[in-house]
Image (cartoon, coloured by chain):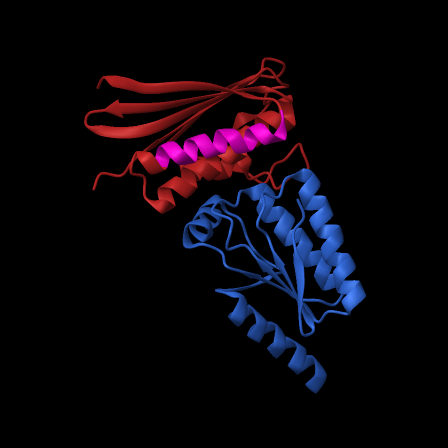
Amino acid sequence: MATRVLSRQEMKIDCEDDVLLVRRRVQMLAQQRGFDPFATAALTTATSELTRNVWIHAGRGQAVVEEIAEGGRCGIRVQFRDEGPGIADIERALRGGYSTAGSLGLGLSGSRRLVDHLNIESAPGRGTVVTILKWARLR
Amino acid sequence: MKVPILRIGRMLLASVQVELRDTVADAFQQDVLAAIEKNGADGLIIDITALDIVDSYVARVLLDTGRMARLLGAPTVLVGMRPAVAATLTRMGFVMDDVYTALNIDEGLHLLQGIAGRRLGA
């Protein structure tokens, strides 16, 4: 099925304030696209976790926020890119409870439970690209 | 930007109105602990009505603050959590142990007064 990109915005992540800015952008789009409050909170929280991951682990990176349409439904896709240390064991990181930064280790595993799709491309020393997608529920 | 801490009888009320970023979070924890010591508070209410998003970082700050307060003898009640926030934290697998929760400030106050009363009675 053809996926159309309705809008696309690249945002830099290189300080803690950027975590907020990316999150607010995604929250606003979700509300405008008719996400209910639970879905909005889920997508916005996942965005917050993953933006913070970029900032904490890589120090800087990028978020690409897109509104997409496919077969009559709308969604929001966010890609988080960094050139940081990368993830050695993606499976383990996704299982949760595993942290290299003294946090709770819920960032990746928790985010996966909040969105419809989460994809990770990463290797040690080669940076990380995490992509999430959530559809607005049809009413 | 500081988190205001008010005194209600023998309880303290901290209303989180701003984003708990790293620097704010540290100051918040220190201010809360200092206020508990200074006032000899019997309990702490943390009001998060103003937060429409609570990610695992902020949740951990709140939980840690509650644990610290308990070590000073002040049990903590987290109040005002929005339904969407509760659903999100639960789906992420976050467990809010070590702090009490209540729907609003009134109920949080009652809960803490009950705990303080039982302590005196024992």
Chain identifier of the blue chain: B
Confirm whether residue A93 shows in the render. Answer: no
Residue A136 rendering spot, x and y as whole percentages = 29, 36
Q: Nearer the viewer, residue B7 or A13?
A: B7
Q: Toward which corner of the image does residue A100 lie, by quadrant?
A: top right
Residue under the image location 61 percent in, 26 percent down: A55
Residue B62 rendering spot, x and y as whole percentages = 62, 52
Q: In this view, does B35 lie above or below A98?
A: below
Q: How many marks?
A: 0
Q: Is residue A90 above or below residue B102?
A: above
- Chain A display color: red
Q: What stretch is highlighted in magenta?
A: A15-30
Residue B30 rendering spot, x and y as whole percentages = 76, 51
Q: In this view, does A18 lie above or below B14?
A: above
Q: Which of B74 and B4 is in front in this view?
A: B4
Residue under the image location 61 percent in, 42 percent down: A104
Which residue ends up furthest to the bottom in the rendered image? B121
Residue under the image location 49 percent in, 56 percent down: B81
Which residue ends up furthest to the right in the rendered image? B38
Residue under the image location 52 percent in, 46 percent down: B54
Q: Main secondary structure of the magenta part?
A: helix
